[in-house]
Amino acid sequence: FANIVGGIFIVIFRPFRVGDMIKVGARDYGIVEDITLRHTIILNFENKRVIIPNAIINSDTVVNDSIQDTIICRFIEVGISYDSDIELATKIIQEEAVKHPLCIDRRTHNDQLELIDQVEVRLISFGDFSVNLKAYVWTNDPLNVFRMHSDINKAIKKRFDAEGIVIPF
């Protein structure tokens, strides 16, 4: 009965539609294929169909990447050794991110005049063995954000190796 009530709420309030890319809770992420009164079917990125009872969807957090603005920020986190040059590591991360074809520039005209970087990199914490940096990389292609993240990670690793930046283990 809870699933049917959940299905009615989904139909009435329309938090997502067929074709939307959603994430339910912390586990289920994909494209909505079908919505019934009992359940919702999501095609995930492993090409598997996940059938989620509507009662669960209505009691969990739903993130809808398809509502309005599809531009998203992907965080790329990298830990470098305490002996490594933070400024050089930051420059490498920025250069490799900006080179990626899916990376977009979200800066306003004023941001550009103020020389704000297209990809901001912040020192976010000091770990036991690393200084941890976080880059904010924007894209308008949520379907390929994982590929972009992976490509940039690989490019950063290659540049770090070539330029003597150490990622501790």
Image: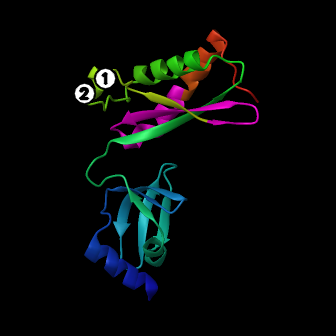
- Horizontal side, residue 84 vs residue 151: left or right: right
Is residue 137 part of the magenta span, yes or no? yes
The outermost residue toward the front is 114
Element class at badge 2: helix
Give the x, y percent position of residue 13.
28, 73
Task: In this rendered view, identify the residue nearer to me: 52 or 83.
Answer: 83
Q: Disc 2 designates what residue?
A: 110
Residue 135, image x, y percentages: 50, 32
Taking the image as shown, residue 71 lies to the left or right of residue 131, namely: left
Residue that carries the numbered disc 1 in the rendered image: 114
**Label 1 residue SS:** loop
User: Which residue is located at x 37 percent, y 30 percent?
Assistant: 102
Would you identify the image quadrant in which residue 154 lies? top right
Query: Which of 129/163 is in front?
Result: 129
Horizontal arrangement in the rendering, residue 37 relative to residue 80 (left or right): left
The residue nearer to you, when weighing 104 against 40, is: 104
- Which residue is outermost to the top? 163
Question: Relative to residue 12, is residue 61 depicted above or below?
Answer: above
* Residue at point 28%, 69% (across, down): 14
**Kind of residue at badge 1:** Glu
Query: Is 14 part of what is drawn in magenta?
Result: no
User: Total label count?
Assistant: 2
User: Marks 1 and 2, how far apart in space?
Assistant: 6 Å
Q: Residues within 10 Å of mark 2 (few under 14, many from 20)?
A: few
- Give the residue at x 31% y 32%: 106
**Numbered circle sitting on residue 17:** none
The reply to whether dot 1 and dot 2 touch (C-beta < 8 Å) is yes
Q: Which residues are magenta?
A: 125-152
Q: Of 70 and 54, which appears nearest the observer?
A: 70
Identify the colour scheme used: rainbow
Image quadrant in which the C terminus is located? top right
Percent coordinates x, y for residue 168 in the rendering: 74, 27
